[in-house]
Amino acid sequence: MKPRTLVLLLSDMKGFTARTSRQTREENARMMALHDALLLPVVRGFGGRKIKGIGDAMLAAFRSPTDSVLCAQAMQDRLAAWNARACEEDRIEVRIALSQGELRRQNGDLHGEPMQLALSANAIADAGEVVLTDAVYLSMAKSEAATEICGERPLPGGGRIRLRRALRGPDPLAPYGGRALLRLGRLPDPARAVRLRVAAERALAFARRRAVWAAAGLALLAAAAGESVGPRDSARRAAELVQARQPLAALSELDRIADTPRANDAQVQVVRGKAEQALGQAGPAFADFAAAAQKDPAALDGAAIAALVDDLDAETFPPLWRPAVVRLLGEQLGRPAAGAVRRLLISPRAQSRADALHVLELSGAATDADRLAASGSDLSDPHASCAARIEAVRRLALVAEARADAQLSQAASAKACGAAEARDLLRHKGRVAEAN
């Protein structure tokens, strides 16, 4: 797909990890249904389109910078009004970041500098806030939202970008004045939308269960004939449902054994993680994969490892979780994960390349070919940071191959970061060769 200039809206929920860890699966599902019922009508009302959701994070795209800012303000006003009358377990707080620039779609995901800037802006936003990059501010109608400068962030290719925060007013029920929200008129009742969604999901689950009732009937007949039907059968059926791309049905099947020791088996946790990953629940999926690896690293098969590697290459994957994924792949899984990780050495994302090489080094599987691949990608990437280019040059100094010298020569002749370091290393290698 050709690059397109869009405005990205990235939101994520305050306290999501803590809440999901203490709630049941049904309560977590209801919380996310409520989140979508409150916010998606606002996104659509301002011409936005939801791109994807990962756990509590939502990514939407807009053509108009002004509409994106109005949407963010309306989202926060709607949540403020809702939280004022909702019980504690139904309150939802989010932070919102906006960025603008050229994006390209690859393998079903968005790639480009605006994605990185949205993540950086989101990192400094607090619950209830709207933070936007200068690019959004310069393109929008300034009269629609008052802002203040709140910080700067480095650009991937060098330089810095200024971030702004939309100003809030004194009204706790409408911190952004409520004007943007009023433009949408009457919105659907979120509580009713949640009830309808829960009812629809139950009906869908019921319909899916009917498809396996015949097998269940045979199992009961087998039990009547003296054969036992227990937790192992539910685990096996859940694995089959994951293979059949029915993750909701798989989770329903695993709920049957939630209170049995079998639920904590490594193999069962891997099946649960795969189902959660298929539903976009990256946080719970990673937790299940990590718990399974703690018990038995061999329980994570190629599909589970591929899911973890995909997380490392997803720009929307929470940065705070990345070190834990790197340690899981490199220290706990080790060499069995090396093959899947190597494909990230030529990823268009500098962070993915760095994480992949770190995994390989931790596992003891890194080779000179891996270091050459990562360094070559860093040096040929026009968006790579100065630090990444210099690190690539230093890495090449440790590789005793002609290809490393060729890359160093190319870096030395480039008018970019790392050129001086590359020239120094080539001179040093020349002196060593003469001495020998």
Image (tube, helix red, strand yellow):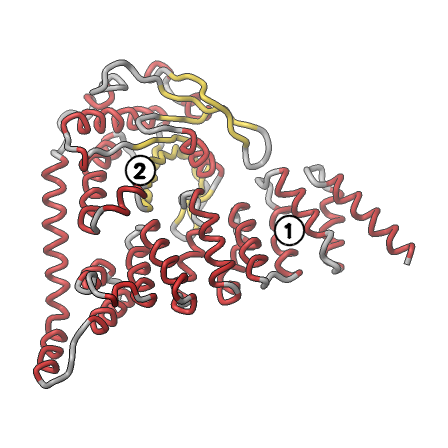
Residue 299 falls in image quadrant: bottom left
Give the left or right position of residue 313, taking residue 91 as reference: right
Q: Which mark is residue 375?
A: 1
Residue to which mark 2 is pinned: 15
**Residue found 84% across the figure and 46% down from its top:** 427
Choose mark 2 or mark 1, whichever is in front: 2
Give the left or right position of residue 138, taking residue 166 as reference: right
Residue 128 falls in image quadrant: top left
Above or below, comparing residue 260 to residue 215 in the picture: above
**Residue found 36% across the figure and 58% down from its top:** 291
Q: Residue furthest front?
A: 261
Give the left or right position of residue 7, taking residue 413 as reference: left
Q: Where residue 19 sits: x, y (%)? A: 26, 42
Q: Could you tell which of marks 2 and 1 lies nearer the N-terminus?
A: 2
Of the 4 image quadrants, the one containing the C terminus is bottom right
Judge whether residue 80 can be spotted in this image: yes
| Amino acid at circle 2 | Gly
Residue 290 falls in image quadrant: bottom left
Q: For this rendering, which residue is in front, 284 or 419?
A: 284
Q: Where residue 295 sits: x, y (%)? A: 38, 64
Q: For this rendering, which residue is in front, 66 or 259?
A: 259
Q: Secondary structure at mark 2?
A: loop
| Amino acid at circle 1 | Ser
